[in-house]
Image (cartoon, grey):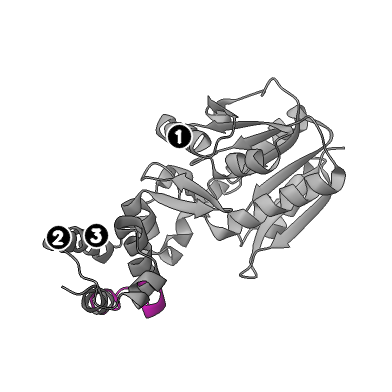
Amino acid sequence: MQIKNYRAYFIETLTPIYDAMETESFFYLILEERNRMKRIDLALQPEATFTEQEIINWNAILEQLQQQIPIQYILGKTVFYGLDFEVDENVLIPRPETEELVEWILSDCKAQKLEDFKILDIGTGSGCIAISLAKNLPQAEVSAIDVSESALNIATKNATLNQVEVKFIRKNILETEDLNTKFDIIVSNPPYVRNLEKAEIKKNVLEYEPHLALFVEDHDALLFYRKIAALAQKNLKENGQLYFEINQYLGSEMMALLQSMGFADIELRKDIYGNDRMMRAVKK
């Protein structure tokens, strides 16, 4: 079968589930990953064909997409902050909003001309934040914590893949009373989606991404933030900085929490979609 004809079938099959632009992006992602062909290659070779085995392989992927399994899990990889990351069902798929948090930290470090400093990423998952910081801040000593051994296995692979050194530690942060090290920067993208918000979550996230990394109980949505902020008060150096990715609906509550815990210079930022998403505070 000609690839261009399969492309038409692929898009027609998936457009009842995804929008046409997303479906087309899926097609070219898979084409590049599985067949080593870019969009331009297909344009230059309009008569190119799939073998029977290739059609079988593509149909298997198509069936998974119809079940709304995330394409990143199907391919086993994604790109975050210009770097390649392996992902599977044990880790959240890194989001563009989190890239903005990384950019904020890097910008601050550059402006402050920090040298020989220590960074801790709490709830590292795939390692995307810690590894991106380590890649762009070779003068920093980066550590990362997660409760999931499976997630840490993926993160360790990703550090090797991206040729950076990150110290990974398995630890339940809610059961931790002291980090036993002083850090210049602590960053976290902890679970923050309340159960009451599940109705807003797409099926491909709700059914396939790890709930351990996503959800908190409605009655205590700031559980992780309160704990991490308390540890930051103990384990940040003077003028050390605490960065969070937050629930878009809880910006004012987060401001109040950090103010009540004695943090200064608290700043709330919106993401590319206009949602309250990132926060920075300074230990004085």
* C-alpha separation, residue under disc 3 versus residue under disc 1: 24 Å
Dot placed on the residue nearer the N-terminal end, 2 or 3: 2
Q: Which residue is mark 3?
A: 61
Point out which mark residue 56 bears: 2
Nearest the eye: 172 or 274: 274
Q: Which residues are magenta?
A: 12-23
Left-right relation of 176 to 87:
right
Front-most of residues 191 and 237: 237
Looking at this view, is 259 or 99 the one in front? 99
Mark yes or no: residue 256 visible.
no
Residue 5 is at least partly visible in this image? yes
Residue at the extreme top = 180
For label 2, the SS is: helix
Q: What secondary structure is found at the residue carrying circle 1?
A: helix
Question: Is there a contact, CB below 8 Å, between mark 2 and mark 1?
Answer: no
Amino acid type of the residue tagged 2 in the rendering: Ile
24 is within the stretch colored magenta: no
From mark 2 to mark 1, how far is it between C-alphas?
A: 30 Å
Residue 275, quarter of picture? bottom right
Q: Quadrant of residue 167?
A: top right
User: Which quadrant does the C terminus fall into?
Assistant: top right
Residue type (three-letter) at the residue carrying disc 1: Lys
Is residue 41 or residue 157 the one in the foreground?
A: 41
Q: Position of residue 209 (x, y in %)?
A: 39, 50
- Coordinates of residue 80 in the picture (x, y in percent): 54, 52
* Mark 2 or mark 3, whichever is nearer to me: 2
